Image: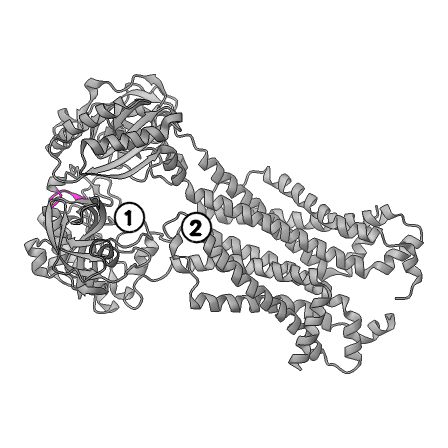
Amino acid sequence: MDILPILSTLRRHKITAFLVIIEIALTCAIVCNAVFLINQRLDRMHMTSGVAEHELLEILFADIGPNKNQKARTAEDLAALRQIPGVLQVSSANQVPFGNSSWNGGIKLDRNQRVSTLNATTYTGENVLQTLGTQLVEGRNLQPDDYMDFDDVVRAASVKDAKGIPKVTVITQSLAQRLWPGQQPLGKVIYYADYPMTVVGVVKHLVRPAFTDNATAEFTMVLPMRITQGLYIIRTDPQNRDAVLKAAVAKMKAINPHRVILKQRPWDEVRSNFFQNDRAMAGLLVGVCIALLVVTALGIVGLGSFWVAQRRRQIGVRRALGATRRNILHYFQTENFLLATIGIALGMVLAYGINLMLMLHYELPRLPAIYFPVGALSLWVIGQLAVLGPAMRAAAVPPVVATRSV
Amino acid sequence: MFGYYLDLALRSLRRNKTLTALMVLAIALGIGASMTTLTVLHVLSGDPMPGRSATLFYPQLDPQDMDGYEPGKEPMQQVTWIDGMNLLHAKRGLHQALMTGGAVPVQPAQSGMDPFYADARYTSDDFFAMFQVPFLFGRGWSEADDNDKARVVVITRTLNDKLFAGKDSTGQTLRMGDSAFRVIGVLDSWRPNPHFYDMNMGNYVASEDVFLPLTTARELRFDHNGSMDCWGTGGGDEEHLETAPCVWLQFWVQLSSTGDAAAYKEYLLHYSQEQKAMGRFQRPPNVRLPALMEWLDINKVVPGDVRLQTWLAFGFLLVCLVNTVGLMLAKFLRRSGELGVRRALGASKREVFAQLLVESGVIGLAGGAGGLLLAFLGLWLVRKQPSDYAALAHLDMSMLLITFLLAVGSSLLAGLLPAWRACQITPALQLKSQ
């Protein structure tokens, strides 16, 4: 196929050709970055939690009136909840993964360090790891004799009594890797609020509540404290989840009619709420990508139709001079391919520029190279599909048109 | 003449309905998307206290010990009980209030209504005057009530509707926790956006349902919500919050004019030096006094996603416009013959140009109208989203006007190039080829 005649034709339609190129370039640049953003969001939404998904229930409550004898009441609650058929484990804890409230604190590797090494979240509560269903990969789990009452710990901390503070902790692999890259974490000591704690166990994954930076998502430690904070986590088999939740709430109400159940939900809902903005954003980006591609395709169809209508006589002359239908079809396809190629080349540069801007303002990573060939290929395909209709119409122009005078 | 051009434009547009629809749709989509996102951005970056925000300030002190000290770092985002009370009682501003969020157990008098938790604000008497909170019935409490830890409460209209069937409930008793409170005021609808005075609860949450004196809430040990940062040996122990080295309160001050800010900052500096001399503060004085809007900027209140969406929508609008320019250009050039005849019959370039601009204006208007409809649809979709700002996404008069101008402006802009290009046609050439 001769490209030169096409180029000389395009030179006579400079502005129109230029507009098509710009449109393809802009679409290519925006769609490349948007798809990248969508993938980032999807990755985030599929983040590993480390817990027994679909098996957990969260009940948040508050007892109205003076809280005398909280401890006994909690023990009674937990014993009653364990009686419910289908319940595997129950824990009175301080927070749930992906929840909105969180305990966080600075961790130091040396007591004399002035600034904390990093900020980690703290899970606590008897049996919290067993209830969440985390996977222990090294060392041991927290044991009954490690545990202290949270109220006693607070009292000990206020008089700086190190004896009353937990001495052991279980951390995640991610935190261990960050604190001691490539080393054996068991037996190492961290300083939490300036109190030393020895790492006795490592769990594979356990994500923190409320975080924005994915890199710190699993900076998690677990402390052995018994706590009564108005949060029960229940692990059950997934089939009876809803029935167990209902039964658990009914039982809690029966034990103390004056309590307010603030929230009761399967943990899956907590997870889904956590990512709701990511889901909405990904949906919006998908919508915009589709709209952009459709508009661009329709634009190509529109312009293609015009060019075909405008050149009807020339096409007729070419056909009369011996050009086949296939030649005409190829002519328009090649023309579109040329315009698309220039547009894509420009679009790549623009995509890279937009990505640099996003990296600067939104802490995004660099656009992976794979997006460039994939983006180019899809725009070529869309361009060819869009021009097919007008090109076929052009190919259908009979040679006799050449003999008619307008 | 305009009427004639309009008639010509409509005729020409009717001749190729698909193409016209395509151009109108492209503009409508672009405008609809940009207006939706622009409206959300506009609503979210609005001024919560119009007319007053320039005189409202949020003092920041640096009461921490030397642990983790870095010179020039931003001081803490809240204040301790001691500092808050000192600043409050110094009364250096026109109005000032110390506050924190909380949740109180409400026990309705009606049988059949379960007890529930209501979001509360524990604050001091000036809160209502400083933020111009509208009252439906009654009034706020007095300084004496703050000092006496009086059992008085101000509730919102929503809660009043729920508990007292919307009647004037001042003087009635409301049981919260184990105490009886006297209702002294009912607020009219009030929802400043963003929830600027305490952004720990979410940037765009509704205002609280119950307001009571901070001193009373502390005496009754009501739960407080929000963030608490402690240092040294501070454990945030509920019993000793008044003396703990922890920041957990917000302090706002209103000055009589923006010009008084320098003097107030000077006062904060003196206060810090004094506290350092007493040994309470250890760090060199580090004070800030952001005004309300600056404080919102510091806290990056407008979600990054919303800004990104706005950029995306304008990128989309640009593509739609380029698309429309291309189509219009093709369309106008195709009519070279017709335009050539008109020029040959004596129409000036200017007249042809005007005629073509009318045609593109018609497309713009239609696209703008479509865009407006799409923007309403888009905002409706935004309101279906679960974010806490979703309910706020409404088009106001100014945004309506901007939509209209954007639509006509951008389509005229899109029409300029094709119309100009079509005017450049040499009439003789066109007539010859016929």
Q: Quadrant of the N terminus of chain A?
A: top right
Name which of mark 2 and mark 1 comes first in the sequence. Answer: 1
Question: Would residue B163 be found to the left or right of residue A171 on screen?
Answer: left
Q: Residue A37, image x and y in percent? A: 51, 43
Residue A235 in magenta?
no
The answer to which quarter of the image holds residue A378 is top right
Circle 1 residue: B201
SS for dot 2: helix
Instruction: Check disc 1: other Cα within 10 Å, few if <14, some if 14-19, many if 20+.
Output: some
Circle 2 residue: B384
Callout 1: chain: B
Residue A236 vertical position relative to residue B319 in the rendered view, above or below:
above
Q: Residue B100, image x and y in percent? A: 20, 50
Which contiguous range is marked in magenta? B241-246
Callout 2: chain: B
SS for dot 1: helix
